[in-house]
Image: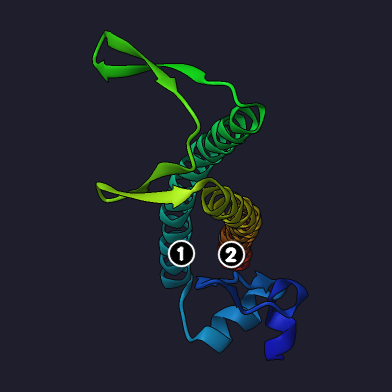
């Protein structure tokens, strides 16, 4: 009876801490199994839906951060490749850089063996060009993998929101049907 009352999609109980929503096929059995009345069940489902929306906002913020980070890493990889190519050709690289807002300077970079990378938290380290290239490639792979996982988490979360909304509608409609049936019995 419990298995017929509610089931989770593909048998998944949760994904990375996000609980799976149970699809309710038999509302009466679900309410009896959970020991809830209709109003309590609706309140519980509404609360769960709000929790899903909060988690979705956090995941969307993480997704925006990663989507902004990936082009920055790719740009850094291009710069390191350009430095290595100029070094191999024996040419100097002319670069314009910003000193402060609206004030730029021009630099001539000759035969460099190292680059400095911002690691975050106001930390900068000097790496050889090969080490910087390897580190940036690893960071790019990690960021892309994290983005893929995040997109899958968001899809799972949206599915859970849909299932919860359908369950809310089913419980509400079942309650309306029950009330109408009782009303019809009283009138006859």
Question: Can you say whether 186 is above or below 91 in the image?
Answer: below
Q: Which residue is at a point 61% across and 50% down the rendered structure image? A: 137
Say which element carries label 2.
Answer: helix
Count the marks: how many?
A: 2
Q: Which residue is at a point 58% across and 48% down the rendered structure image? A: 133
Horizontal side, residue 93 vs residue 177: left or right? left
Say which element carries label 1.
Answer: helix
**Is label 2 in contact with label 1 (beta carbons under 8 Å)?**
no
In x, y percent, where is residue 66? Answer: 51, 45
Q: Give the residue pinned by disc 1.
A: 48
Which quadrant of the structure image shows residue 106?
Answer: top left
Q: Nearer the viewer, residue 87 or 53?
A: 87
Horizontal side, residue 101 vs residue 163: left or right? left
Residues packed near mark 2 inside 10 Å, few (<14), some (14 to 19) or many (20 plus): many
| On-image quarter of the C terminus | bottom right
In x, y percent, where is residue 53? Answer: 46, 52
Measure how far apart labels 2 and 1 are at the Cα level: 14 Å
Question: Can you say whether 88 is above or below 49 in the image?
Answer: above
Q: Which residue is at a point 46% across and 76% down the rendered structure image? A: 37
Q: Nearer the viewer, residue 149 or 116?
A: 116
Q: Mark 2 or 1, which is nearer the eye?
A: 1
Question: Can you say whether 146 is above or below 129 in the image?
Answer: below
Disc on the earlier residue, 2 or 1: 1
Residue furthest toward the bottom?
1
Q: Give the residue pinned by disc 2.
A: 171
Q: Nearer the viewer, residue 90 or 142?
A: 90
């Amino acid at each position: 009876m419990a298995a017929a009352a509610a089931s989770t999609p593909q048998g998944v109980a949760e994904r990375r801490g996000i609980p799976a929503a149970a699809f309710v096929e038999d509302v009466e059995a679900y309410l009896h199994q959970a020991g809830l009345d209709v109003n309590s069940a609706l309140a519980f489902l509404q609360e769960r839906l709000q929790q899903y929306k909060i988690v979705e906002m956090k995941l969307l913020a993480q997704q925006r951060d990663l989507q902004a980070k990936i082009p920055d890493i790719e740009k850094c990889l291009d710069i390191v490749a350009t430095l290595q190519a100029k070094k191999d050709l024996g040419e100097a690289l002319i670069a314009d850089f910003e000193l402060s807002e609206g004030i730029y300077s021009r630099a001539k970079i000759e035969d460099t063996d190292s680059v400095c990378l911002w690691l975050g938290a106001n930390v900068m380290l000097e790496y050889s060009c090969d080490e910087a290239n390897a580190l940036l490639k690893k960071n790019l792979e990690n960021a892309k993998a994290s983005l893929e996982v995040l997109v899958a988490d968001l899809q799972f979360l949206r599915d859970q929101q849909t299932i919860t909304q359908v369950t809310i509608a089913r419980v509400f409609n079942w309650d309306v049907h029950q009330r109408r049936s009782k009303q019809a019995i009283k009138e006859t």
